[in-house]
């Protein structure tokens, strides 16, 4: 064969292989185009995990009459010209490859009208070939619908995961953009169901609420705007955004979102810097929720690393690492309650001084953090701030604490996640275990405590492949909708790892043959627990996130509830297991498992000293 130039269609298809790997890549390119066009509202609509339909509608600048077809030519871009410095690119796209690549592997319908022009254009392409083109009346902005993705590239299509899994990736992506671009209102719907909505208008907390829920949003702490230097110049690098209070930590790393100059990025070292900043604030194996927005001089950022463009290099990475870590660390030190157990009522409340702090509780036995010994943490960071050991307490930074009469243990801050040996005194209100240890009295929430124990058991069983299953005498049929069926087939391994043995049984039904042994004494609830697991997968997000939620769900279903009478032996057994837990102080959702009244608290409370 002699050397010849590839025809356009072939060249586009090859380029597509690099840029358009899966449905989420299409969403990424279209959303980035919308952002580059200055949109303030972006709607994403998905069907069939993106292979049936991906539609992105924006209210950006639109494409001028006569240019819509050009936009679908290779290397057509409005964003770079021959004189541009490729290092300093401020837009998200710049290669001019995305639209032709997408069009070469799907059917595309694009409509656009530039603001200020009376009519727009509509273009219909199939595998890169123009089918229809004409003028049309459409709202200002651009809409691109991509149908039948990869239908002419069966090999690529086979390589995709299930619709549910592809949707999960899309949701992760849109979540990330919604968080790093809170100036833009995002909406994602899939199969007609709304998956996330954010308000736009630079409301970052609102964006967190729209993606992770309002409980998380309330517990996010603000990274302060950097102070200008004395000469009025703001630092070249700055770090803003929101960092989660330690009370809302997660069991995996999927909740750290990074941006540089408004561009969502992935960078392991910077993520690590954030985790390091939480050192001593979170228990082992816990990871923070954070949206960290870095501003850096354009010339410090190299975006031209890979066509997919998410992994970004900094030319002075150590500097960025240090800035990010310092910003998050000092925020935590300044705002997080001291690591101490506090009395549940204010000693002099009866005298009417209610909320006054005079005579109020003081910090007792605050464990020292090991900040000072952490070589990764230069000591200057503690200057001028109150380290955890000095006892500053700021109320209501933690959502679960806000409005609470009692202040509970703030467990994530206790350094050694160990419990002393506890002597069971009894059960109160069929909900709490009362116990005493060498250092005072403990009130333990039996459900939260058991959830913690179960959570660690399940995690262990999954990691070691040792889940204990119990055969059901009578297999239980469970009805599934088509979506659940698909999720199930995708996650069979994980679910089996938890001890469920299921087999398909006619249309839309599965038979549960065995259940995790920890559910053995509540077989009636097995179906609910099982469906609960699938719901967690369906909620989407990142793999680690829903794996974690699935474990928490099973832990919840297999735990004693509030309002259950426990025998003394059962209570004691629970205490023993809790003592052995790695993080005995919190349940998997981050709520406390116990309240501790120390000996000095008691003495002070009763006016004995
Ligand atoms: P790139 O983004 O790298 O320039 P694309 O193939 O993604 O390449 O897009 C080609 C061109 O089409 C862009 O440079 C831009 O001028 C125009 N364009 C694409 N999408 C939009 C949009 N949503 N709104 C306005 N213009 C758009
Ligand atoms: Mg683009």
Image (tube, rainbow, N blue to C red):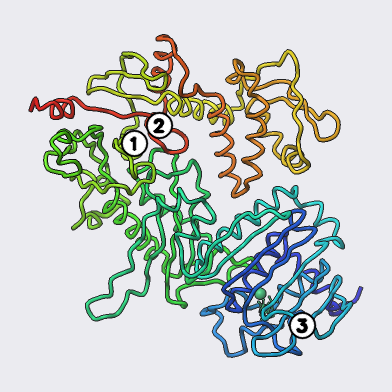
To which residue does mark 1 refer? 411
Q: Please tell me whether mark 3 sits on a helix, a strand or a loop.
A: loop
Circles 1 and 2, Cβ within 8 Å, touching? The answer is: yes
Q: Please tell me whether mark 2 sits on a helix, a strand or a loop.
A: loop
Residue 471 appearing in the image: yes
Query: Which residue: 68% across, 27% down?
Result: 527
Are there few (<14), some (14-19), or many (20+) residues within 10 Å of tag 3? few
- Point out the tag, 1 or 3, that comes first from the N-terminus: 3
Which quadrant of the view contains residue 42?
Answer: bottom right
Between 496 and 194, the residue placed more toward the observer is: 194
Image: 401 above or below 317: above
- In the figure, is residue 592 to the left or right of 97? left
To which residue does mark 3 refer? 137
Task: Give x and y (percent) for residue 316.
Answer: 41, 68
Circles 3 and 2, Cβ within 8 Å, touching? The answer is: no
To which residue does mark 2 refer? 583
Q: CA distance from mark 3 to mark 2?
A: 60 Å
- Point out the tag, 1 or 2, that comes first from the N-terminus: 1
Residue behind label 2 places its C-beta within 8 angstroms of ligand 2: no
- Point out the tag, 3 or 2, that comes first from the N-terminus: 3
């Amino acid at each position: 064969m002699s050397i010849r130039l590839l025809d356009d269609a072939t060249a586009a298809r090859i380029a597509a292989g690099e840029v358009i790997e899966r449905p989420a890549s299409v969403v990424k390119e279209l959303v980035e185009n919308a952002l580059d066009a200055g949109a303030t509202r972006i709607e994403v609509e998905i069907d069939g995990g993106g292979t049936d339909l991906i539609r992105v509608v924006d209210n950006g600048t639109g494409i001028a009459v006569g240019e819509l077809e050009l936009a679908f030519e290779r290397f057509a871009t409005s964003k770079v010209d021959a004189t541009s410095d490729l290092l300093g690119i401020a837009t998200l796209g710049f290669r001019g490859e995305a639209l032709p690549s997408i069009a070469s592997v799907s059917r595309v319908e694009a409509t656009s009208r530039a603001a200020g022009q009376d009519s727009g254009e509509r273009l219909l392409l199939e595998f890169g070939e123009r089918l229809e083109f004409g003028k049309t009346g459409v709202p200002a902005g651009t809409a691109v619908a991509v149908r039948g993705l990869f239908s002419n590239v069966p090999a690529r299509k086979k390589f995709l995961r299930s619709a549910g899994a592809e949707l999960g990736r899309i949701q992760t992506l849109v979540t990330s953009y919604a968080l790093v671009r809170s100036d833009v209102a995002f909406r994602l719907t899939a199969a007609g169901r709304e998956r996330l909505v954010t308000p736009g208008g630079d409301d970052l907390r609102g964006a967190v609420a729209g993606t992770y829920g309002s409980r998380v949003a309330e517990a996010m702490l603000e990274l302060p705007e950097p102070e200008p230097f004395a000469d009025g110049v703001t630092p070249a690098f700055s770090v803003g955004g929101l960092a989660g209070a330690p009370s809302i930590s997660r069991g995996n790393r999927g909740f750290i979102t990074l941006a540089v100059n408004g561009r969502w990025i992935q960078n392991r070292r910077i993520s690590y810097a954030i985790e390091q900043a939480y050192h001593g604030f979170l228990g082992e194996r816990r990871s923070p929720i954070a949206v960290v927005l870095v501003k850096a001089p354009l010339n410090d950022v190299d975006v031209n690393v890979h066509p997919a463009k998410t992994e970004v290099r900094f030319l002075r990475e150590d500097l960025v690492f240090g800035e990010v870590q310092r910003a998050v660390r000092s925020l935590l030190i300044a705002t997080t309650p001291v690591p101490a157990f506090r009395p549940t009522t204010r000693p002099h409340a009866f005298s009417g001084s209610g909320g006054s702090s005079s005579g109020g509780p003081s910090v007792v036995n605050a464990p020292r953090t090991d900040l000072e010994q952490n070589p990764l943490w230069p000591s200057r960071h503690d200057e001028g701030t109150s380290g955890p050991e000095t006892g500053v307490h700021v109320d209501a930074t933690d959502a679960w604490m806000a409005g609470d009469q009692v202040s509970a243990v703030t467990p994530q801050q206790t350094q050694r996640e160990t419990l002393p040996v506890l002597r069971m005194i009894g059960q109160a209100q069929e909900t709490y275990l009362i116990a005493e240890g060498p250092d005072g009295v403990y009130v333990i929430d039996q459900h939260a405590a058991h959830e913690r124990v179960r959570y660690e058991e399940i995690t262990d069983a999954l990691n070691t492949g040792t889940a204990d299953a119990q055969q059901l005498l009578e297999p239980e049929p469970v009805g599934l909708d088509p979506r659940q069926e698909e999720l199930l087939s995708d996650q069979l391994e994980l679910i089996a790892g938890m001890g469920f043995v299921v087999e398909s049984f006619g249309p839309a039904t599965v038979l549960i043959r065995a259940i995790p042994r920890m559910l053995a004494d509540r077989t009636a609830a097995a179906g609910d627990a099982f469906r609960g697991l699938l719901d967690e997968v369906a909620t989407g997000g990142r793999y680690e996130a829903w794996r974690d939620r699935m474990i928490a769900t099973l832990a919840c279903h297999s735990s004693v509830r509030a309002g259950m009478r426990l025998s003394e032996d059962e209570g004691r057994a629970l205490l023993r297991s809790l003592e052995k837990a790695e993080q005995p102080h919190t349940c998997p959702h981050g709520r406390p498992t116990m309240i501790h009244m120390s000996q000095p608290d008691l003495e002070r409370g009763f006016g004995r000293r």
